[in-house]
Each structure stands twice: as structure tokens, then as C-alpha cells.
Amino acid sequence: MASISIPLEKRRSALVEWLTTVDHKKIGIVYMGLAFTFFIFSGLLALAIRTQLAAPGMTVISQEFYNQAFTMHGTGMIFLFTIPFLVGGFGNYFMPIQIGARDMAFPKMNAFSLWLFVFAGFVMEFGFMLSMVANATGWGNLGLGSAASWNAYVPYSTRAFSPQAGMDIWLIGITLNGISGTLGAVNILVTVYSLRAPGMSVWRLPMFTWTLITTAVMILLATPVLTAGLMMLTTDRNFNTQFFTTADPRMWQHVFWFYSHPAVYIMVLPAMGVISEILPVFSRKPIFGLKALMVSTALIALLGFTTWAHHMFVSGVNPLIQRFFMFTTMLIAVPTGVKIFNWIFTMWGGSLNMKTPLMMSIGFISTFTIGGITGVFLGMIPVDQQLHNSYYVVSHFHYVLFGGSVFGIFGGLYYWLPKIYGRMLSDKIGKVQFWLMLFGFNLTFFPQYILGLLGMPRRIATYLPDRGWDIPNLLSSIGAFTIAFSVLLFIINFVIYIVGRKGEVAGDDPWEGNTLEWMTQSPPPEYNFKTIPVVHSERPLWDIRHANDNTNAHGKH
Amino acid sequence: MEGRHKMQPIHDPMRKNLGLFGAIVFIVSESMFFMGLFLVWFYLRDASQAWPPLGIARPNIALPVLNTVIMAISTIAMIVAERGVAKNNQRALINGTAIAAAMGLLFMTVMIMEFSSLGFNPTTNAFGSSFVMVLVFHVLRVFAGVVIMGVVLVRAFLGQLNGSRRALVQACAVYWYFIASIWLIVFYFLYIRL
Amino acid sequence: MLVNTVTADAIAINSLYNIALFFAVIVFFIVQGLLLFSAYKYKRKKADELPAQNHGNMKLELFWTIVPALIVIMLFFLSANTLSQLSGAGTQASPIHNVHKIGDDNAKRRIEDAKRTDMIIEISGRQWFWQYKYIKDGVNHSSQNDGELVIPEGKVVRLDMNSKDVLHAWWVPSFGGMLYVNPGEMSYLWIDKPPRGSYIGQCNAYCGLQHAQMISRIKVVSQAEYDTWVKLKKAEQGGVATEGGNAERGAQLYVDGGYTYAEAIAKGDTKNTGLQAQEVADLSAYLDTLK
């Protein structure tokens, strides 16, 4: 609890301090650091995959390793990067400050969630890495990697077809990760419910906090169902229970997608929250249609729970049920569209401060739109019966999750790292990174739409030269390395300007921010605020900055 | 730099109830976990010709009925404890919690007897797996509830709980009511409606 | 936008795709246009400029809620319409469920009534190849060693599919449509009157190590070529094949001849095969197409 005070006289070494911290900001930083490490690792796997697919019939990596690589690329990016970075990292660090709290509601449980995440992450990745090293050095096959793809469809993931221990390790890792996430979600909801600053009513919640609580609700409702399914699969594999031996294979698919479809929104909603913070600040305007954005966020979350079986249009689900899921799936495009137009009209008529965070946000809107539109295509059953599991799908969800979440994360990093470390990143390098990333991203994934239309299935380790897939694949691989280079630029930027302290001193509020995190110092003190601020509108800092204006500039409704 | 102990206190009535609210939110996720278990139960049931499958005897209802009574007594004891602490009645708190915990232990014992008396086990077929899985995960919650009651008892003996510091008791109670409700659902679907 | 669509199913899916693409392109240009325009037009010119503090506009909100909603609802109905045009779909009100448990006779009867079918091929998905069984013609075949699924042109072919191990999915993009092939269940797809040509498909549900090698090659040929191919296959199969309903004669042919039809024709020695002159000509023509 927050009441526990650590006497300053009792100095601890830095390492012990980081390992035992219950401060939401330090926990957030550890989340971000680890999640980013997993991002790099999973990204390297993507490079291995793209190298293998650059030309037909390549044997750069073995088929076995390829199958493990795409499994770990997917699970790593989803469970160890995107969700923990946005929810555990940005969420932990900024949500309490944005609502004017001094910490999370349950700081010890927060630390427990973090270390459970760390443990789960290493459980998931360590066996795979060991296997990889063993194979590379010729020690033989340790069987500690999982190769059942991220959806672990039965019966392939049962012991009969995946006997290696790696599959169990993977299942345990995902289960623990889910428990960590669920506890984190409890913490977020209790914190926002009970620790808001005076005056912080529901409609005055910052958009990032709003998307975060929506996300937390989704985690809370969806993750335990997956946990139950994972436990059943684990006992089937290890204790000879019979859940998946006689049931039709769709049972696992229902359980899996009941979590994993909402998981898509879990990954993208907080990133939408990030750009909903950036756009009004860098446009020097209030966000357009705040209530519409908040309601559409909630609607997306609600509808997100009614669309899972659209992943099963070719699995043999009853056709009338399929039609229901087609309807809900197509409907979810509407609140998503509302968001896109509201973001654009936030910029419309504004005074745009063309810095990296804003450019990343524009990149988000541009690429996410393409992902959203192609999502409607895939929601149409006849089209999905043609394009399910093809590279069209791969491209679609990368447009949503890279074009959306990753652009959002980098936007958030350029926006918030000055707050966390008190130094500015280089805007010049940031802009170069943005253009390279945007170009590389479209070069990687747009050809994959074409590959899908040409009939290329996903998860294949190689392909024949007579299929006409060579050129799009080559372009895609070149694009992947361009993305990698752009991420490298970010790391260089971070190392020179923040670690090397070359960046300008940020000050409390380098961007003319609207929300409470810009009220305190950079980096914020352990207790965040000397006095808890009182909030009068959704832009408390704007109110302070324009307190003496008599113009129309007032932030209140 | 100011230390934490110099922080301005937050005068927010919600703060006291963090534990209770946390327990309620946590219960939502627990409910979803059991929903996952039951979804599988119903999915398997609807997909099979007979439920329980042919050759599997219907489980005897005697021990579960006993357990339902035990759960009811336990719940009443917990209500007494919770009301007691609200009125600063330490005896009601300690006795109520102790009885509730004892009933919880008894419930677990009866459940172990139930497991050994079932004519099937989790490896028999999907019915057996699903049946036992639901019971096991419920009895694990009972165990967790008893552990929390143990913490309540210790803190009650130490005199740390009273009318104005009772979030822990409230959280423990609400979680225990949740476990009891889940037991009713389990009892209904696994025994009565089988 | 789909490539090389040859059957009515594939063409129907393609035209649905193109209608959606029409709206998608419009939405795409509106969004990207507004985005780029505002990014270009409203760049900050003076450090202290203060734009009008516009909080929103209810009419605009309603506009961009209702118009997209109408578009997706229209696309929903178009999709449902296309869906009922596809092979073996049944009616809108009672669509055919084309996957059922093995042994579910009611479901099987519904499949048999769903669409007039000229021939049935049983397909077994295995790690990592497809086994083909031509029910009427008694031919067994597989996708191993580049084995082709040979079917006659202009026929309605029903694929009765089942998996012997893990999940697989049947997908030949040119024919439109895809379906999972599950253990313990039958999955049905129709190839509706395909024109002559060579087509290629691939297992599209990840099935393990050699998933990428689980390729299905389809060759649609004339009825005459098909008949000859059947004879050829039956002869290759020797004892298990039948000749004119006579298994013994089939076996004899193979044994007596000492080699397959193909070899016989290559050597110009068709005496022992018992083939008619016309059949030899057909066979030779067919074998030429294989070269």
C-alpha cells in the first residue's frame, strides 16, 4: 500500500531498489525496458522469417526453426511486447500521474504483476533460445521450443502431434503472463475508480486513461477464459485428461478466440489513447468530439466481445451463427471510423506543431485506416472464405498492430520519454526514423496484400518458384530490413540523447501538454505531486496556461 | 527531496475501500474463469450423445448436499463476522471467521471424499475431465478463501481490525460469498441438472 | 482483384470483393486526403498562434457514424446474397452446414441434397499430403511426388474431405472458397464446372513441419482425357483396379502386360493391353500433354 514509507536514510543499492520497487513509475520503466527487449528479439525473428522468404526455395533457416520462429515472433510481439508495453509500461507510468494519483491502488501487487510477467516472459523465451543455440552449435534438438503457432490449434498442439516439452513451457508461460495481466487490470481499474484527483469526473479523464480502463475491462473479462483453456490443454498434455481428444476442434478455437479477438483491441486501444493525447496537444486544440471518442472506445470494447467467431468462418461453424458474427464484425468498423474522423478533425483548423510524436500519430491514422478497411473485407464471409489464413490476413493485422500499435508506441515514446528522463530526443533523427519506418512498413506489408490475393498461405516456410510470389516477397523482405534500420535509429537516438544526456533539458512541459503529467517535474518525483491538483476540465494544464485569457481559448465546455 | 512520509494525506473516502473494490473487480475475473470452465462443460455436453456418457454412473448426490449445508453455515458465519466487525464486536468477528474457516476446511475434506467416491476420474473421458476440473478449481478457491480467513484471524487477534479498519474482512467476506455462489452453480449443473 | 478466377464461385467472390473495393478506395482517398490536407494546411506558422477551440460537431459525428454504418450494412446484405449463391450454400433462411461429424447421416443427406453433383472425390488430409479417392471410378491417388488431382471439365465435383491427423485446409484460389479439414469430421466443398487448365492450391491450416510442402495440383482435362487417365491409373494400381467392372481382368491386364499402359504406348506395343485403337490414340494424346 501507498502508506508504506521507505526512510530515505536507509540507502539501498540501485539494483536492489529496482528489484524491490513498488513505485509505479519504476515498475513502468522496467516493463517498458523488458518489453522493448522482447520487441527487438521478436523483430529479429521477423527478419529471419523475411530473409527465408525473400526468394523461393531458400534454406537460410531450417523448416523446423522457421516454424518456431513465427510462433515466437507472434507470441513475443503480442504477449511480451505490445500488451505489456502499452498497459504495463505506459499504463503504469502515466495513468496514475494523469489522474493525479501518487501510485497505483495496490503497489505491491503491481510489483508482483511485473515480476510474474518477467518470469513468464523468460519461461516462454528461454527454452526457445536454448533450443536455438543448441541447434546452431550442433548439440542436437533439445525440444524446448514451441512450434504450434500462436493460436496453438488442437489437435496439433496436443501431445500426440507436439510431444516436445517446449509446448508445455510455452503454455505455462502464456498462462502466467495472463495471470499477471489480469492482476494488472484489477489494479488499473481500482486505481482509476478510487484515486482520481478532485474534479476528475468520468468525462474529464484523459483519453489515454480512458482507453486504458477500457482495455483493463477487456483483459479482465477475456484473459481468464483463455487461462481456463490453457490449463485444460496443459492437463490434457501432462495428466491425460480428455478435453480435446473427443471434442470437435472448434472448442479450442472458441476458447482461444474468445480471448484473442479482444486481445487485438487490448493491443490497439491504448495506442489509440496515446495518439488521442498527442493530437490535441500538437494541434493546440481540444480533441474533436471527446465524448464520441470515449463512447466509440467503449463500443469497440463491447462489440469486440461479439466478433470472435469471424476467425472461424472456414472452420465449420454453423452458417447462421457465422452470419451473426459477420454482422457484428462489420459493425465494429463504424466506431473505428468515428475515431479516425475525430482524430483528423482534431488537426483540422489547428496549429500543427510538426514534431515526431505528431508525425507518428499521422502515420498511425494513415496506416491503421488501411488495416481497418481491409478488416471489413475479411469480415465478409465469402471474401474470408477466399482469403482466410492468407498473407492478406497477415498484412491486415500488421497494418492494425504495427501501423496502429507500434506507431502509437513510438509516438508515445517521443512524446513521453522527455517526461520520464527529463531530456529531449532528437527530433531530426525522430523524423528520419518516422519516414523510414513509414516507407519500410508499407514496403513490407502492402505487397503482402497482393500475395494474399495471389493465394499465398501464411505460416509456410518456403514456396515454389512457379507461383508468381517472388517479387512481392522480395519487396516485403527489403521493407522488413528498412523497418529494422528505423528501429535502430530510435535506439541510437535514445542512447545518445537520453542515456548520453546530449538532449536538451525538457523542463516540466516541453510540448504545452494538457494533462496532469506535464504539471509535475521531469522526471517526476517519487510522490508525483507535491499537492494533489484540482481539475476543472479535460485539459487542466490548458486551463492554467490560459487562466488569464478572455478569448475563446477556455478549455471548459 | 521530500520523503513519502511528508506527503499530504489524500482525503478521499474511496481510499478505505480499495481492498473491497479490488476484491469485487477480482471476482469479476474469477467469474470469467469459471465461465470458461462451464463453457467447455456445456460445449462438451451438447456435442455428446449422452451426458454423462454411457457406462458412467451418475455421481451420488449425498456428499454434495452435505457440502451445500456446510457452505451455507460457513456463509452465515461469515456474515456474522462481517456485521460484527462493523460494530466493533471482536468476538463476533473472531468466532464467525473461525467457524467459517473451519467449515471451509470441512468442505475441502468432504470434497476429497467425493473425489475418491466418484465412479470416474479425469482421464476416463471428456465428461470426467470437465467434471473434475470444475470441482478442483472450485475447491482451490475454497482453499484460497480459508487462507485469507487465516490472515483475517491473525490480524483480528492482533487487534488490527475494527469498525473503521475492516476492508480486509469485507474483501474476505465478499470473496467467500462468491465462492459459495459458485458452489451453488456447480452443484446445480454438475449434480442436480446432470 | 482476385487472380485467375475460373469457377462461378470464384467469380461471385471476386465481384463481391470488387464492390467492396470500390467503397474502400473512396473511403481511403477521403481519409488520406483529409489527413494529408490538414497536415499540410494547418502547420504552425507563428509560435504563438491560437486556433479556434472547437470541441466537436454533433452533425459531423452523426454523418460519419451513419454513412459508414449504411455502407457496412449494405456490404453485409451483399455478402449474405453472394453467400447463398455459392455452391451447396442452401437458402438464405436455411443455409447448408458443410461440416459434420463422421456418421451423422442426417447432415450427410442434407449435403447430398444441397447440389446436383456429377462426381465425388474423397480427400484425406495427412501430414503432409492429400490422398484422393475417386469413388465412382475406383482410382486412388495422392499429391505426393507432384501427383495431380485430375478432374474432367464442366462437371460439378464434390470433395468429401476428412483429416487423418491434425487440421488441414483445402484451398485452390482459382476455384474460390476454402474449408478446414478436421479429424473426425467430414467437410464438403464443390468445384463447380471448372474449365480446362492447371491449377494449384496449398494446405492453408498450419499442420506442422512440412506444412509448406502440402501442395495440391489440379489438372482439369477433357472427358476423353480423363477417361484415359482413369484407365492408366487403374492399370498402375493393377490388382486393386477394375477394368469394366471386372477386377480380375484389371489385375490380369497389369500382370499380363508386365508394364503399365504408359510404358506399353511408349514402346508402341499395345497388343497385350487389350486397348481399342481409339483408346490408344486418346492415351497417346494424353501422354503427350504430360510431356
Image (cartoon, coloured by chain):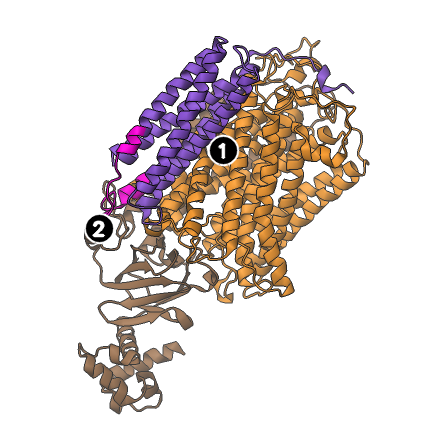
**Which contiguous range is marked in magenta?**
B41-66
Inspect this view and state whether residue A402 appears: no
Asked if residue A47 is positioned above or below residue A19 in the image, the reply reads below
- Mark 2–mark 1 CB contact (< 8 Å): no
Q: Which quadrant holds residue A143? A: bottom right
Q: Nearer the viewer, residue B72 or A154?
A: B72
Q: Residue A213, position in %: x, y?
A: 53, 26
Labelled disc at residue C107: 2
- Residue A206 in magenta stretch: no
Q: In x, y percent, where is residue C110?
A: 20, 51
Q: Amino acid at mark 1?
A: Ile
* Residue that numbered label 1 is attached to: A219
- The type of residue carrying mark 2 is Ala
Q: In the image, residue B95 lies at what x, y percent?
A: 45, 17
Residue drawn where x is 82% and y is 36% of the image: A502
Tell me the orange chain: A
Q: Which chain is purple?
A: B
Observer able to see residue A537: yes
* Chain name for mark 2: C
Q: In the figure, the brown chain has which letter?
A: C
Q: Is residue A7 left or right of residue C248?
A: right
Q: Residue at x 22, y 62 (%)?
A: C118
Callout 1: helix, strand or loop?
A: helix
- Lateral position of residue C104 relative to residue A154, left or right: left
Q: Chain of mark 1?
A: A
Pick whichever, A64 or A319, lies toward us: A64
Where disc 2 sits, the SS reads helix
**Whether residue B138 is situated above or below residue C89 in the rendered picture:** above
Which of the image's four quarters has the C terminus of chain A? top right
User: Which of the 4 quarters of the picture holds residue A533?
Assistant: top right
